[in-house]
Structures are given as C-alpha cells and as structure tokens.
C-alpha cells in the first residue's frame, strides 16, 4: 500500500500553482517507488504503464511539476532519472 497524506489530497488543487489530477497521480505513483531516503527512480515507461498513459505524457507531467517547483528530476547517464519530491513536501 502507498500512504498518501490527507493534507495532499485535500490541498493539491489549492496549491499555488495548483496541481492537476494527472500530476497528482504521477506523484502518487512516484511515492510507490519511494522505499528509503533516496529519491525514487522508476522509468517513464514503467510509470506510463501503471498510469495508463504514454511515456511522453508522463514526461510532460514531470516537466510541468518541475516548472511548478514541486519536483526535481536528477538525470543520470545510462540509468533512469531520480525524482526528488522534497520541494513538494
């Protein structure tokens, strides 16, 4: 199971700037891969399959979350990105 704070579920549309439903869904899926203190690193294809969308769509949602300041992608050569959710929380 993946714990989601009630505060996040109650406030994601009221954030400034607000988060869309799909952006929240991406955050929830990223949290499923958060097993320790390190930033999670699922691939875009993995996330897309779990979300029922294309990898391009996931990339676009990640990009908008970055632009809004809620996510930091740490790009790695030859490996999947790490997704730092610290700015959101």
Image: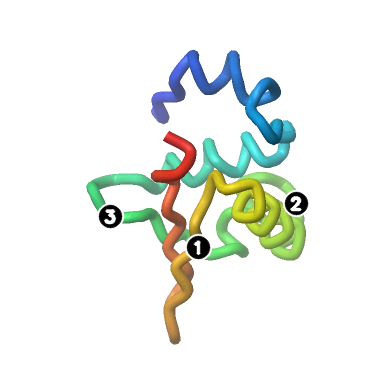
Q: What is the number of callouts on the image?
A: 3
Q: Residue at x 44, y 46 (%)?
A: 85
Q: Can you tell which of label 3 and label 1 is closer to the viewer? A: 1
Q: Relative to 77, is 58 above or below?
A: above
Indicate the quadrant where residue 2 lies. Answer: top left
Per the rendering, the mark at residue 38 is 3
User: Which residue is nearer to you in this view: 86 or 54?
Assistant: 86
Indicate the quadrant where residue 67 lies. Answer: bottom right
Disc 1, SS? strand
User: Which residue is nearer to you in this view: 48 or 88?
Assistant: 88
Residue, disc 2 = 53
Left or right for 29, reference 54: left
Q: Can you tell which of label 2 and label 3 is closer to the viewer? A: 3
Disc 2, SS? loop
Q: Are marks 2 and 3 in contact (CB under 8 Å)?
A: no
Per the rendering, the mark at residue 5 is none
Residue, disc 1 = 73
Indicate the quadrant where residue 17 lies. Answer: top right
């Amino acid at each position: 199971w993946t714990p989601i704070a009630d505060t996040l579920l109650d406030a994601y549309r009221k954030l400034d700037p607000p988060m869309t439903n799909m952006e929240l869904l991406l955050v929830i899926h990223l949290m499923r891969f958060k097993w320790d203190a390190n930033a999670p690193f699922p691939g875009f294809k993995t996330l897309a399959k779990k979300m029922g969308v294309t990898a391009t769509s996931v990339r676009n949602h990640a990009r908008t979350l970055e632009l809004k300041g809620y996510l930091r992608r740490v790009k790695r050569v030859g490996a999947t990105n790490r997704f730092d959710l610290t700015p959101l929380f």
